[in-house]
Image: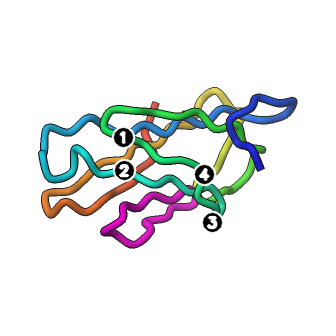
C-alpha cells in the first residue's frame, strides 16, 4: 500500500530524522515502518510525509543494527494536535522515536 499519496479523508503525518553530527550514526539508514510494513528509509536530516487514515497506527524505526522500536501513533485531523514524529539516536547510538508536541 502506498502511504505517500494524499487522498480524501487521509491526514498528513510527518516523520523527520533529526540531523546528527555523530559519525557513528550519521551514515546509517533509519528504516521506517507503518503498521508493521517497512515503507522507506531516512538518511541523516531527511523527512517523509505519510498520508494515513485517522485512528491508531503503529510507526516503527530501526537500523540494520537495532531491533524495531515501535510506538502507537494516533492520527487525528484535530488541528490542536500535531501529527509529527522525530527519529533520533541516543548516547549509546540506539535509534529512538517520539511524537513531537505542537
Q: Is residue 32 left or right of residue 36?
A: left
Task: Return the residue at label 1.
Answer: 43
Task: Return the residue at label 4.
Answer: 39
Q: Is residue 34 left or right of residue 41?
A: right
Label 1 – label 2 distance at C-alpha: 5 Å
Label 4 – label 1 distance at C-alpha: 14 Å
In the rendered structure, which disc, 2 or 3, sits on the residue that comes first in sequence?
2
| Residue segment shown in magenta | 59-72
Q: Position of residue 38 (x, y in %)?
A: 58, 58
Q: Residue at x 15, y 63 (%)?
A: 92
Which marked residue is nearer to the observer: mark 2 or mark 3? 2
Q: Which residue is farthest bottom?
A: 67
Instruction: Answer above or below: position of 14 versus 31.
Output: above
In the rendered structure, which disc, 1 or 3, sits on the residue that comes first in sequence?
3
How many neighbours does mark 1 have within 10 angstroms: few (below 14), some (14-19), or many (20 or more)?
some
Label 2 – label 4 distance at C-alpha: 13 Å
Q: Secondary structure at mark 4?
A: strand
Amino acid at each position: 500500500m502506498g502511504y505517500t499519496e494524499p487522498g480524501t479523508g487521509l491526514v498528513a503525518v510527518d516523520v523527520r530524522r533529526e540531523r546528527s553530527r555523530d559519525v557513528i550514526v550519521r551514515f546509517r539508514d533509519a528504516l521506517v515502518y507503518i503498521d508493521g510494513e517497512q515503507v522507506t528509509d531516512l538518511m541523516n536530516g531527511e523527512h517523509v510525509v505519510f498520508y494515513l487514515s485517522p485512528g491508531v497506527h503503529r510507526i516503527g524505526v530501526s537500523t540494520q543494527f537495532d531491533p524495531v522500536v515501535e510506538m502507537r501513533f494516533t492520527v487525528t485531523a484535530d488541528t490542536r494536535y500535531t501529527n509529527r514524529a522525530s527519529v533520533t539516536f541516543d548516547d549509546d547510538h540506539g535509534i529512538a522515536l517520539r511524537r513531537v508536541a505542537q
